[in-house]
Amino acid sequence: MKKVRNRHGQSVGVLELGILGAEGLSLSRDGKKETVDAYCVAKYGTKWVRTRTVMNSLNPRFNEQYTWEVYEPATVITIGVFDNNGTNGGNNKDGKIGKVRVRISTLESGRLYTNSYPLLVLRPSGVKNMGELHLAIRFTCTSMFQMLLHYWKPLLPKMHYVRPLKVVQQEILRRHAVNLMAARLSRAEPPLRKEVIEYITDSNSHFWSIRKSRANLYRLRSVFSGLLGTGEWFQDICTWKKPVASTAVHVLYLAFVCLPEMILPIISLWLFMLGVWNYRLRPRQPQHMDTSLSFADNVHPEELTEEFDTFPFSSQDPGVVKMRYERLRSIAGRAQTLVGDIAGQGERVQALLSWRDPRATSIFMVVCLVSSVVLYVVPFKVFVLLCGLYIMRHPRLRRKTPPGLVNFFKRLPAKTDCML
C-alpha cells in the first residue's frame, strides 16, 4: 500500500504558547456581574485549546502551556479572553474581553517573547480597554531550509488556482465552516460556544462598516504615500526649488542614459542598502491591536451603532435607517464620480484610433507616422536624453498653461455623453 501523504507537508518548526495570566480585567457586561469568570481560547490551524475557568478574579492566573506543529510560517495564532456567563447554569452568552493575534513569520526563531498585550473591545459606546493579557511565545525552527523554501511555494493547493472560487462561494463556505466548527467544538469537554468561535474566527469581518472603510482608505493612502512623496520630490526637481538637487539629478540622469546597463544593478544595490539601513529600526516585539489604525479611538457613536446593528434586518427606527441610507448614497455618489472619471480617461485612450473624432484620430496618426521616422533616424539614447531634459527643464523655459499633448488628450471624446 502507498503511504498516505501528509496534506500539510513537512513541519518547519514548533510553536510554544504560554498563557500566563491577565490583569485589570473589566466586566464584560456592566451591571450584570460583580466579578469575572475568565478563561482563554487559543486557535492555530485546526487545533483549538481552552484554559480552565478562573472564578471570581479580575487578575486571573492560568500558567498553562500549549504547543503546535508549524507547517506554514505565514499564519496567525489567535488568543481570546472570555467571561464565562454560564457557570451558574444560565444560558447567557459568554462575554468578550478581548483577543490577540500574532503572526508566526514575525517571530525570530528560538527567541522567547514575554509581553503584555492590551485587550481591546469595540462596543456601541466606543473602544474600551478590558485589561492586559500576559503571554509567552516562542517559535523554534526545525528546518531553516524548508521554512525559506515555503516563501516560494503557493499558499493554497493547486486546485484553488486551477478552478478558483468566487467571492460569493467563499462567503458561503466560510459561514458553513464556522457552523460546522461550532457544532463540533460544542461537544468538546469543556465545550466552546458558538459566539466564541465567531469571535475568534472573525466571521462577521466582511460586514459593512464606515469605520473600516475609512481605515482601509487611510491604509491605502499610507501605502501610496511613498509614491506620492516621490512625485512631489520630482515636481520640486522639475521646478528647480532646490538648484543643487536639480543639478545633481540632471548629472545622474545623463550618466544613466550613457550607461543604461548600470540602471538595474544600481537599483538592486540601492534596495539592498536600504534594507541594511532599516535593520536597526526593525520591530523588536510582535504587533498588537492598534486603535488609531482601526479608527476606533475617535469614531462617531452613530457609526458604531450602525456597525453593531443586526443584519440583514435592522433593529433601529425607520428614520435612523433612512438617514444611514442617505449618508451611504452620498458616499457612493463620490465613489461613482471617481469611477466615472477613471473610465472616461480609459475611453479617451481608446478613442485615439476609433475614429469617433475623425480630426483627432487623423492628428494622432500623423504624429505616429512622424514619430516613427524620427525615432528611426535619431538614436534612442539621444531621444531619451532630450525627453528627460525637456521634462526637467528650468521654469523660465516653461509656460503656465498645460502642454499641447495634455490639451489634445482632454479634448478626446468619452462615453459620458451617452450616459442617461
Image (cartoon, rainbow, N blue to C red):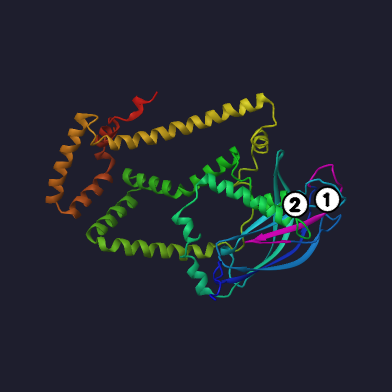
Q: What residue type is labelled 1?
A: Gly
Nearest the viewer among 341 and 59 is 341
Residue 86: which disc? 1
Nearest the viewer among 335 and 174 is 174
The quadrant of the picture occupied by the C terminus is: top left
For the residue labelled by badge 2, is the local secondary structure a helix, a strand or a loop? loop
The quadrant of the picture occupied by the N terminus is: bottom right
**In the rendering, at what x and y percent does residue 18 appear?**
72, 66
Q: Is residue 381 above or below residue 68?
A: above
- On whether residue 264 falls in the magenta region, the answer is no
Do labels 2 and 1 touch, CB within 8 Å? yes
Which residue does the numbered mark 2 point to in the structure image?
193
Q: In this view, does 363 lie above or below 109?
A: above
Nearest the viewer among 370 and 1 is 1
* Crowding at mark 1 (Cα within 10 Å: few <14, some 14-19, many 20+): few
- Horizontal side, residue 256 vs residue 81: left or right: left
